[in-house]
Image (cartoon, grey):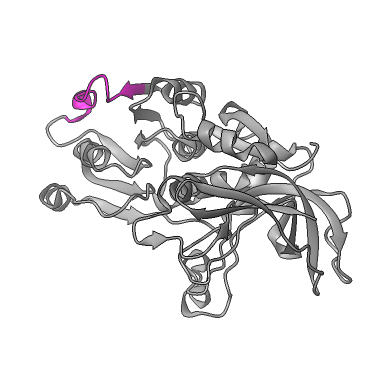
């Protein structure tokens, strides 16, 4: 019987058997191969949720996944048995007011894998076998399963960069060099950023940031004033991608922006206060970036074409049965960047 990894409460993960289910029209069965542990998975593991979102029932974790097509329902034409596919966890309803005005990532009835936002919770994808809609699958020929499972976080980064507007020639600051921050560095460089400065409080992740294209890396734990050269009289940078969710990073980053610069907030940790006088006087634009939708197939294509290389982020992998060690490793930013669970042979 297939297994799935459930979060019951903070620090309470359990591997349990689950029913396999039968295919409906337009569906396929995926033999899961890889699943990346995301920051939201760690929030559920460490705290039982984040902000106002808390676990109220056992929930299967996971939404960064890839696997092989193992079974097709009648009428599915664009997939074949054995195809390696990246599976998007974004499942908008297509009928609500937000979907109808072209914002599927803001769907009022979103069924995003491994999310405790609605109740009952939307069960996730850390399981041996997963039934999905054929339209959720993007064939990932030429990639391996570990790369294909990176399509989801890369989609988040691509969506964030698109929220910032034209990137050509811009001077960019990325605060927080976890996987999303590193992928934003890669995406911003590909979009034409002229200079990228990256900050974090952990030296190992800053080294990966350098390898992935950051021109300047600054350890703000060692030097809290590391950004002072970029303050100028009224800021010197064009775009801030705030990926840490830390109040200190947001405030310090905003201070580096010149007039009519842009703040893109990705990090999710709870409400934060803002320097509204500075935002007003400099006419800064503040925008959020939440999830993604249409950037998912683009993420796969960019990896296939060699335009973005996610290999430097893939630091650890563990069999599903070793989930406890996998989550402990993912929690340790001095050792790990992206930790993936292995569901079968790759």
Give the image location of residue 35, x and y in percent. Answer: 65, 44
Asked if residue 197 is among those painted magenta in the image, a careful observer would answer: no
Task: Please say if 99 is above or below 6.
Answer: below
In this rendering, the answer to whether 87 lies above or below 204 is below
Quarter of the view holding residue 141: top right
Q: Residue at 65% across / 32% down in the picture?
A: 317
Q: Measuring 51% from the left and 65% from the top, which residue is drawn there?
A: 57
Q: Quadrant of the N terminus?
A: bottom right
- 219 within the magenta span: yes
Name the foreground residue: 94 vs 16: 16
Q: Give residue 206's position: percent from left, percent from top.
A: 42, 23
Residue 304 visible somewhere in the drawing: no
Query: Going by the image, does 263 lie left or right of 333?
Result: left
Nearer-the-camera pick, 109 or 302? 109
Residue 288 falls in which quadrant of the image?
bottom left
Residue 114: x and y, percent?
56, 58
- Seen at 53% across and 67% down, the residue is 121
28 on left or right of 287: right
In this view, 182 is above or below 213: below
Examine the rendering and report whether any part of residue 280 can be seen: yes
Where is residue 10 shown, x and y percent of the image? 45, 50
Magenta span main SS: loop
Q: Which residue is located at x 18 percent, y 25 percent?
A: 228
- In this rendered view, identify the residue nearer to me: 290 or 30: 30
Magenta segment, which residues? Answer: 217-231
Q: Quadrant of the C terminus?
A: top right
Q: Nearer the viewer, residue 93 or 116?
A: 116
Asked which quadrant contains residue 248, the reply is top left
Residue 227 in the figure: left or right of residue 321: left
């Amino acid at each position: 019987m297939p297994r799935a990894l459930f979060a019951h409460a903070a620090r309470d993960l359990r591997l349990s058997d689950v029913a396999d289910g039968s295919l409906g029209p337009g569906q396929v069965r995926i033999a899961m191969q890889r699943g990346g542990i995301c920051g939201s998975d760690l929030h559920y593991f460490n705290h039982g949720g984040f902000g106002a979102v808390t676990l109220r029932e056992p929930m299967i974790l996971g939404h960064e996944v890839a696997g092989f097509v193992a079974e097709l329902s009648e009428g599915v034409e664009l997939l074949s048995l054995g195809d390696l596919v990246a599976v998007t966890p974004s499942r908008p309803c297509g009928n609500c007011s937000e979907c109808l005005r072209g914002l599927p990532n803001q769907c009022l009835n979103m069924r995003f894998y491994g999310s405790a936002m609605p109740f009952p919770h939307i069960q996730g994808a850390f399981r041996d076998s997963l039934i999905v809609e054929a339209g959720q699958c993007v064939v990932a020929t030429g990639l391996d399963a570990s790369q294909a499972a990176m399509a989801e976080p890369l989609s988040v980064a691509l969506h964030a960069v698109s929220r910032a507007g034209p990137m050509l020639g811009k001077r960019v600051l990325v605060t927080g060099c976890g996987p999303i921050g590193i992928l934003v560095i890669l995406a911003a460089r590909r979009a034409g950023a002229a200079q990228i400065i990256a900050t974090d409080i952990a030296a190992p992740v800053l080294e990966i940031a350098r390898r992935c294209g950051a021109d300047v890396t600054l350890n703000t734990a060692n030097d809290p004033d590391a950004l002072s050269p970029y303050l100028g009289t009224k800021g010197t940078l064009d775009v801030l991608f705030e990926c840490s969710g830390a109040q200190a990073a947001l405030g310090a980053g905003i201070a580096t922006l010149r007039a009519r610069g842009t703040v893109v907030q990705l990090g999710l940790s709870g409400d934060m206060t803002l320097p509204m006088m500075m935002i007003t006087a400099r006419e800064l634009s503040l925008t959020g970036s939440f999830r993604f939708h249409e950037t998912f197939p683009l993420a796969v294509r960019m990896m296939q074409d060699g335009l973005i290389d996610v290999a430097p982020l893939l630091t650890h992998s563990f069999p599903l049965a070793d989930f406890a060690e996998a989550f402990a490793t993912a929690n340790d930013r001095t050792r790990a960047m992206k930790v993936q669970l292995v569901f079968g042979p790759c």
